[in-house]
Image (cartoon, rainbow, N blue to C red):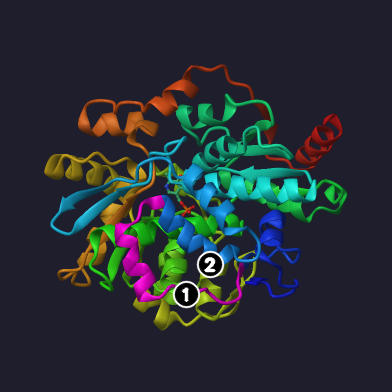
Amino acid sequence: MLLFRSTNGQSPAVNLREALLLGLAPDRGLYFPDTFPKLTPEEIAAFARLPYHEIAFRVLSKFTEGIIPRDVLAAMCHAAYNFPVPLEIIHVRVFLMRLDQGPTASFKDFAAQMMARMFGRFLKEDNRQVTILTATSGDTGAAVAHAFHKIPGVRVIVLFPAAEVSESQRKLMTTLKDNVRTVAIDGKFDDCQAMVKRAFADPALAHIPLSSANSINIGRLLPQSVYYFYAASRVAQAGEPVVFSIPSGNFGDMMGAVVAREMGLPVKKIIASVNDNDAFPKFLATGHYEKISPSRNSLSNAMNVGHPSNLARLVAVYGGQMDETGKINKLPDLAAMRRDIFSTSISDECTVAGVREVWNNFQLLLEPHGSVAWQGFQDWTAVEPLGNSPAVIIETANPAKFPGEVEKVVGWAPDVPANMQASLQLPESFDRLGADYEKFRAYLLQQHTAA
Ligand SMILES: *Cc1c(COP(=O)(O)O)cnc(C)c1O
């Protein structure tokens, strides 16, 4: 059975089930596979003829052996991935992969839908209950709330920065009710994330079984490797390396590409495109890591992250060690990292220009996150030749989630997809708290006794 170790190295290795249910390791590190299961070139070549849910099954079954029976996993994949994954041609062999057709119109549905099903199964088997505590910069909360809505044994508490999420992002989480509670925090996303992290380490809350659905949960990460296999199966010849440009905040999406590559997918370059929160591109260039605190606001608000939580995992893949505060105890192999990964910071001005250019030149509509990926790809082609390689730009949200930004550029507001339309009509309910940990602890205790 595959084991998962903590990036801090102070907690025992656990299986997928425990890693998923715990979220964060007891030593506050992140769980990561001890060794990566491999797919052979033949197994990967066979993906060209398979639908998305079947590729998901073949990739994820490498991690769930001995934990989830194969027929159960196959049914989960079938139920979770019942929406299209469009790949649109931008030009020649450059494609746009739209990961926005799930229930909350962001790529986070890919992970949340699968993780919720795994959680539901593990909890039922053990007759256990958990409270899922999650901080969101907008889209995670919606995806997690929808995925876990009405799952027995689960209560969901979502913290979001009151002033940093768009109206439609907020309504996708605050209109669900039942086992889902949302809390508007008068602070930044980083404050929400810090409060969640403290709650996990708080002895006064030890009697409440808490779990996380943030990208720190390994259950969020593994399903995000699948769409890289899927994209390659549709745009590349067997064995042909692909370039991926990924709009990055907490680097969970980008780590999905790293996991796919570690499992055997040929990848020419991973482009980690960030907004003004440029701690990672600076680190890659200099070897010196300095988190950005407070994080910087930008148009791509789901990426306003000053200290990307998944960096500890990336550093671990390259043989280094970074603790949860961002302190590097052992440097990773920077030369190898630079060979595999390119990273660049895209300003808001450049983000707006990207939406305009892609619309004017190719009649394809991007929203700010996808535009950051597009512009990051442009930056990369300025320093390395693409040649005849296929490239995939990741669009992580539906343009209708950012109607204001998009309308300013193209002159009209994008159509709202039917799945979002429904949520926007329903009445909202959410609680409000300051960015004050003591108050949050009291809130959690009160929620627990109320149940
Ligand atoms: C969360 C999110 C991102 C960033 O993904 P990470 O895995 O945190 O890097 C990018 N775009 C959108 C629309 C998102 O919701």
Q: Which mark is residue 38?
A: 1
Identity of the residue drawn at 45% across and 65% down: 280
Residue 213 x %, y %: 62, 49
Residue 383 x %, y %: 22, 71
Residue type of the residue flagged with mark 1: Lys
Q: Is residue 134 left or right of residue 233?
A: right
Q: Is residue 250 above or below residue 320?
A: above
Q: Which residues are magenta?
A: 32-52
Depth check: give the residue in front, 411 or 434. 411
Q: Within the image, what quadrant is residue 32 found in?
A: bottom right
Residue 377 x %, y %: 26, 60
Of helix, strand and loop, which one carries label 2? helix
Residue 79 x %, y %: 50, 42
Residue type of the residue flagged with mark 2: Lys
Quadrant location, the C terminus: top right
Q: Where does label 2 land, which residue? A: 62
Q: Within the image, what quadrant is residue 144 found in?
A: top right
The reply to whether the magenta stretch includes residue 36 is yes
